[in-house]
Image: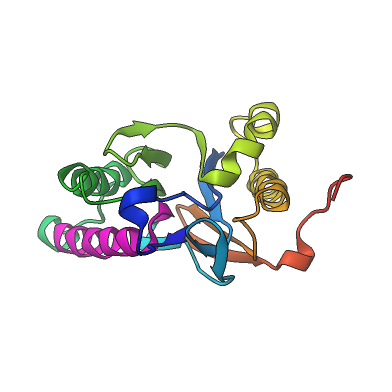
Amino acid sequence: MEKRSADSRVKGVSTGTTILAATFDGGVVIGSDSRASIGGDFVSSKTINKVIQVHDKIYCCMAGSLADAQAVTKAAKFHLSFHSVQMGTPPLVIAAASVLQELCYKNKDELQAGFITAGWDRKKGPQVYVVSLGGMLIGQPVTIGGSGSTYIYGYVDAKYKPNMSREECLQFATNALALAMGRDNVSGGVAHLVVITEAGAEHVVVPGNKLPKFHNE
């Protein structure tokens, strides 16, 4: 996650983060690191929470320009709250992802932010959607993003299993974030994780000194 610098229009914006989401039997885990950088070179904050609640059982993770991502999630919250009041029922996860997609696509020439949306609804249960920088929307059972994701594709492909238990999925997500944070110099801090099920959402924070350690760290 990057705070926009003065020359971001020239250099582009690094995603500078690690974000992920994975479904398990009855729910979904979404999580991220907590480090923000300027220009992809300097750490400006170690305590950014990139897992944002957009409705009761729907959360999103953001990567790219922090200012752009915060503006989009704020607008999405408003749209979904208004939608919920109009319909008299909580919004579907796909509806939340579609709102983010529309905002990103309509402003694709100005925005430099991408999102992972995850949640639970009564129609389809646990779901994960990716909204890319240009506004593409795709659903996946597990996904990763940000600069740290390049270090953990092999781990995710090897270790993710459909219909894992809550504990297995939470450990899988924690391990994946720890691996990425140990290798990517602009990912770090603590691991923010949210477990979403029919019963509600639980926020889990794993401090940096409590993250799993691996043989080469």
Say whether residue 192 is magenta: no
Position of residue 217 relative to residue 152, above or below, is below
Report the colour scheme.
rainbow
| Residue 162 position in % (x across, y down) | 59, 30
The one nearer the camera, 209 or 37, is 37
The residue range painted magenta reads 60-83
Left or right relative to 139: residue 105: left
The one nearer the camera, 10 or 131, is 10
At 26% across and 49% down in the image, what residue appears? 100
At 52% across and 55% down in the image, what residue appears? 40
Position of residue 122 relative to residue 68, above or below, is above
Q: What is the magenta segment's predominant secondary structure?
A: helix
| Residue 99 position in % (x across, y down) | 22, 48
| Residue 115 position in % (x across, y down) | 38, 48
Left or right relative to 52: residue 26: right
| Snapshot quadrant of residue 32 | bottom right
Say whether residue 64 is magenta: yes
| Residue 181 position in % (x across, y down) | 67, 53
